[in-house]
Image (cartoon, rainbow, N blue to C red):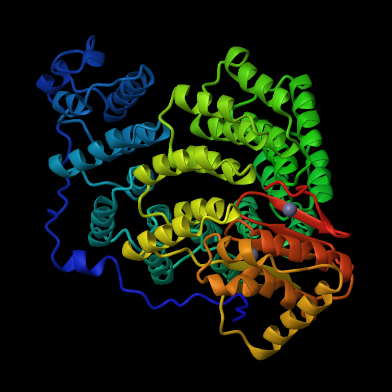
Amino acid sequence: MKRPLTLIAKARGSPVRAYLSASALPETRRRTPEWGGAALSRNPLAAGTRAGAAPPWLAVQAALMSLVDSRVRSDWWDSPSSLFLQFDEPIDSKVCRHLIRRYTGQGKHLHSVFVFVQMQRVGVRPDSFTFAPVLKSVARLCLREMGRSVHAYAAKANFDGDVYVGTSLVNFYGGCLLIGDAHQVFDEMGERNSVSWNALITGYTHNRKFAEALDLFREMQADGVEPTEVTMVGVLSACAHLGALSLGKWIHEYIDCHGLSLNEFLGTSLVDMYAKCGAVMEMEKAFVAMRIKNVYTWNALISGFAMNGRGEAALQAFSRMMMENLKPDGVTFLGILCACCHEGLVDEGKRYFRIMKDEFGLCPGIEHYGCMVDLLGQAGLFSEALHLVQNMDLKPDPIIWRTLLGACRTHRNVPLGRYAARKLLELEPTNADNYVLLSNIYAQDSMWDEIAQLRAMMNQKALAKVAGCSSIEIGNAVYEFIASDCLKPEVHDLLDDIRKELKQVGYAANTGLALYDIEEEEKESSVAFHSEKIALAFGLIRSPPGSTLRIVKNLRVCQDCHVFFKLVSLVYKRGISLRDRNQFHHFAGGSCSCRDHW
Ligand SMILES: [Zn+2]
Ligand SMILES: [Zn+2]
């Protein structure tokens, strides 16, 4: 059941070998540039060069470079092939590399890839520095097969032993969600540096394998490789997702002790980590300690306050941000609207939604609309919420309808709930969450026939629910639990004991609702053994008395668990912070920071 952080298995198939054996790529030909008058006459920059006298090689190349620069700078949208047609002769690997780097740097990834392909066509052999930008572009476009071909090409040209090329490949595979291949390349690298380690750690966090990313960080240290600022950004992101506060704090100390530069990126990662671990005070301290802050830093602070139920503090932070003359972006307003949602500040929310467009010229995204629908719906303003949904600039997506459906459940608005559910099921007929949400509304009004129909539909479609999973950090280890009926006897007994104690202070399993308020959990009979309850019991046994328990859950917490946690915080005198899919619940003394609104 419990799973401490484990090392990653490394036996993986080589991504290159299959391509090497049946590679259809032509051998690279090295073409020596020939500089004749005809070639030069096609070069507008060469006007003024004496006919017949070949200019020095470097001068022409510099002219070409500047042409490439000016073309790229002036947002040259034509196909880069014209350059090849024009300068077929003088093109060499240096020019191509320059061109590719420029394109990649400007986000013109297709152009970059095109140039690389053209290089093969005209027989220009790339150098080792060409692979990094082209692989970056290939990763951005998620052209997996193309990337594998580039890999095979690099191997064939004997560049795969180059640390720079190897690291670029790790970056590419990690970025394309092929983390097994990334690890394989990493393992086969003869030489690795901190950048290679960073590429792999970042790859694991990008692939949402956070526990493995932390394992790698430990391996990197055991290998004697000094972590850099980039490493720490990756590791802090993993800590944030896992809610691993102790390790996050350790990283913070490491940064301070080893004189790593607390730049905007690293500082913002720290603020974000503390926010997502529910450590609001530490988040504020880390924010204050930063000398230079950018809009991302402020966004991390504002959304950190919002997700931790500190709506007022988020709004105050926004005012301070305005006083510092920083221009907010869409993420800032998302944090602000979430803060208004948590606080139930309807008028404030409407005002911010308006000034976002009118004063800052930002177009609301679907998430902003989602927040507004939530705000209006939770306040019971259903006609306004529906009006917004029906008149928004974007097509309402499933999240919008699900938000409305959630508000209908809170206010027991069955007719609108049914309408929202119909819209939702049109868009997402195979998402089990939607059926569960609607069945909850029916359960509140004891509409058992309708529930039976929904269940039959779910069975007919053989919809699988997402398994609930919770993690808890104790010491420096993170333990993960999944909801299950086959528990170890001691955890089963302990949960029984806790339940008996809680009954004495008024806990009664809400059988009518709890049976159907199963959210996305695997089995309805497991309400009593939801993963967060198991993590909580484990935490009570294994952590020092009085310490705060920090649990992260992948789904939204159900009503039964919410009541259970509130009472445990009262009876066992423990602070508990539970981060569910949407927000934080800080339980203390029998109540929750969300004020039962989630
Ligand atoms: Zn639950
Ligand atoms: Zn709560």
Tell me: 340 left or right of 198.
right
Q: How many marks?
A: 0
* Foreground pick, 596 / 128: 596
Tell me: 519 left or right of 336.
left
Q: Position of residue 426 (x, y in %)?
A: 35, 43
Q: Residue 487's image quarter?
A: bottom right
Residue at x-position 34% and y-position 45%: 130
- Looking at the image, which residue sits at the far top? 48
Can see residue 418?
yes
Residue at x-position 33% and y-position 43%: 141
Tell me: 371 left or right of 395.
right
Q: Position of residue 401 (x, y in %)?
A: 48, 39
Tell me: 426 left or right of 375.
left
Q: Position of residue 19 (x, y in %)?
A: 20, 64
Q: Position of residue 454 (x, y in %)?
A: 42, 57
Which quadrant contains ligand 1?
bottom right
Residue at x-position 36% and y-position 23%: 69
* Foreground pick, 174 / 278: 278
Q: Is residue 305 above or below residue 364?
A: below
Q: Is residue 9 above or below residue 53?
A: below
Q: Residue 564's image quarter?
A: bottom right
* Foreground pick, 55 / 226: 226
Residue at x-position 57% and y-position 56%: 446
Can see residue 170?
no
Pick the quarter of the image with the N terminus.
Answer: bottom right
